[in-house]
Amino acid sequence: MAVGRFFWDSLLRSKTIYGVTKNHVMILSGVFGREEKTLAIDELEKIKLSERIDGYGTITFYTEYSWYDRLGLQANWKPVAPEFDIIQNPAEVYRIIMAQRTTPNPDA
């Protein structure tokens, strides 16, 4: 069961495509079907960059701010924020996304 989780995660990651346009970030994913998530860049309240020393990282897109986010708390039951998960050169992708914003990011 534990090994299957890693196999499934790897399979799902291999079937996921991330994109950035002038006004949107897009996530296409799915193993048996396709799910598309499109977010308007200017409507994102917060964009968080997390980098690892191996050159990979994650960009998380927050569309709603709740009290536990403001306090820095983590809740197991809160919805998962959309993200570009474990991508190469995350700082460069983050820079491209931020260049498309017309409204300032409070955490930039």
Image (cartoon, grey):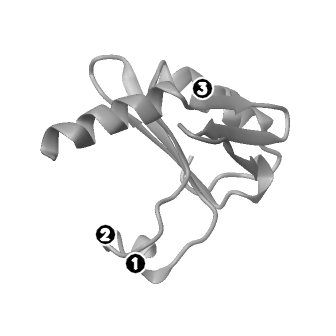
Residue drawn at (40%, 78%) of the image: 68
Q: In the image, what residue type sits under mark 2?
A: Gln
Q: Which callout, 3 or 2, points at the residue further toward the start of the chain?
A: 2
Spatial distance from mark 1 to mark 2, Cα to Cα?
7 Å
Taking the image as shown, residue 75 lies to the left or right of residue 20, namely left
Q: Which residue is mark 2?
A: 74
Q: Which residue is mark 3?
A: 93
- Residue 93 percent across, percent down from the top left: 60, 26
Q: In the image, what residue type sits under mark 1?
A: Tyr
Q: Which callout, 3 or 1, points at the residue further toward the start of the chain?
A: 1
- Mark 3 surroundings within 10 Å by alpha-carbon count, few (fewer than 14), some (14 through 19), many (20 or more): some
Contact (Cβ within 8 Å) of mark 1 with mark 2: yes
Q: Which residue is mark 1?
A: 68
- Residue 90 percent across, percent down from the top left: 49, 26
- Residue 57 percent across, percent down from the top left: 40, 30
Question: Height in image: 76 above or below 51?
Answer: below
Q: In the image, what residue type sits under mark 3?
A: Val
Spatial distance from mark 3 to mark 1, Cα to Cα?
27 Å
